Image (spheres, grey):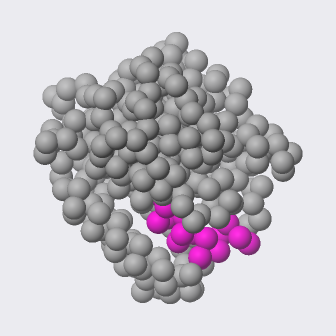
Amino acid sequence: MPIERRTRIWLGMGSWLLAGTSALGLGAAGAGPLDGEPGVRGEAPGLQRLAQAQGGEKGTHHGHGTAAKPEGGEGGEGGEGGEAGALAGAGEHEAYIARLLLVRGHLAVGKELYEAKRPEDALPHYLHPLEEIYEELEPELAEHKSRDFKKELQALADAMKARKPVAEIAEQQKALLGKIEAAARIIPAKERNSPGFASRVAVLVLKVATEEYEAAIENGRIANAVEYQDSRGFVAAGKAYLGRNEKALRAKDAQAYEAMLKAFNDLGKAYPGVVPPEQPKLSAGEFQAATSRIELQASRFH
């Protein structure tokens, strides 16, 4: 099983959460599956980091029925990588909004794959939010007396497993995204729409995307499609989130905002389609370099 670096961060802000989900808004990355490409390669590793970082541990990756790999060992596992690392120093509200965006991103990628007639490939992205993320959201939802959306997540996953029509999946997903948007509103708009908050969250998303992208590459090829797809979704989410907060970011530092967008566009070149190419379009080093440029510019908003 590939190295497990499951850092999942999603930010659900305003009406962006209700935006269309069939394409992820990365230019070429919004294209459909590549003609002649094989099916999704590799297993979807279990998202273990978040639960372990907060005192819990999942013993089985439910989406695939495989035992989770123990933490520690080689390749930056244990507490060094994954969500624990990416969330280090993040505020409680940033982490909460991040998890909502994570859920939203899985659903976007899953829907894109489902619409491309790749239901088996879509399945992990519909299962992970419920099995590996939602329990971390429940305490804050309860604390703020926000309506949960667990039943809706389960119903959508069940509909997908039952191979319901694309239009029916889209309708259910749109309704679910509305509930995720409502959950995001737990955090006051003044805070969650501020330039500092938005830029910090964008960096968190990109740290996740970088780890996912690196985990997808083995021996110079894309060996794990689920990781590639997660990374694709995270980059798209970060870019869309910045766009959603463009007015505030430009008012604070227009030059830094433009530089961040340019680096996001560079990252978009890594994703020619939802089904990965055999050879990565960007090396892990090139990907990290673009992420670092974004992080540098984001620091100007703090």
| Residue at 69% across, 43% down | 137
Is 196 located above or below residue 6 in the figure? Answer: below
Q: Return the x and y of residue 63 as percentages of the image width and height.
A: 47, 23
Name the image quarter holding residue 6: top left
**Considering the image in quadrants, where does the C terminus appear?**
bottom right
Name the image quarter holding residue 58: top right
Q: In this orientation, which residue lies closer to the viewer: 252 or 135?
A: 135
| Residue at 62% across, 36% down | 56
Is 48 located above or below residue 261 in the figure? Answer: above
Q: Is residue 19 left or right of residue 213?
A: right
- Can residue 127 be spotted in the picture? yes
| Residue at 54% across, 69% down | 200
Q: In this orientation, which residue lies closer to the viewer: 90 or 96?
A: 90
Q: Check the image and name the residue furthest to the right.
A: 145
Q: Specify the principal SS of the magenta part.
A: helix
Q: Is residue 147 left or right of residue 252?
A: right
Question: Magenta segment, which residues?
Answer: 190-205
Q: In this orientation, which residue lies closer to the viewer: 85 or 257?
A: 85
| Residue at 68% across, 49% down | 181
Is 231 located above or below residue 189 in the figure? Answer: above
Q: Return the x and y of residue 298 as percentages of the image width and height.
A: 47, 76
User: Is 47 a magenta residue?
Assistant: no
**Considering the image in quadrants, where does the N terminus appear?**
top left
Q: Return the x and y of residue 86 as percentages of the image width and height.
A: 48, 57
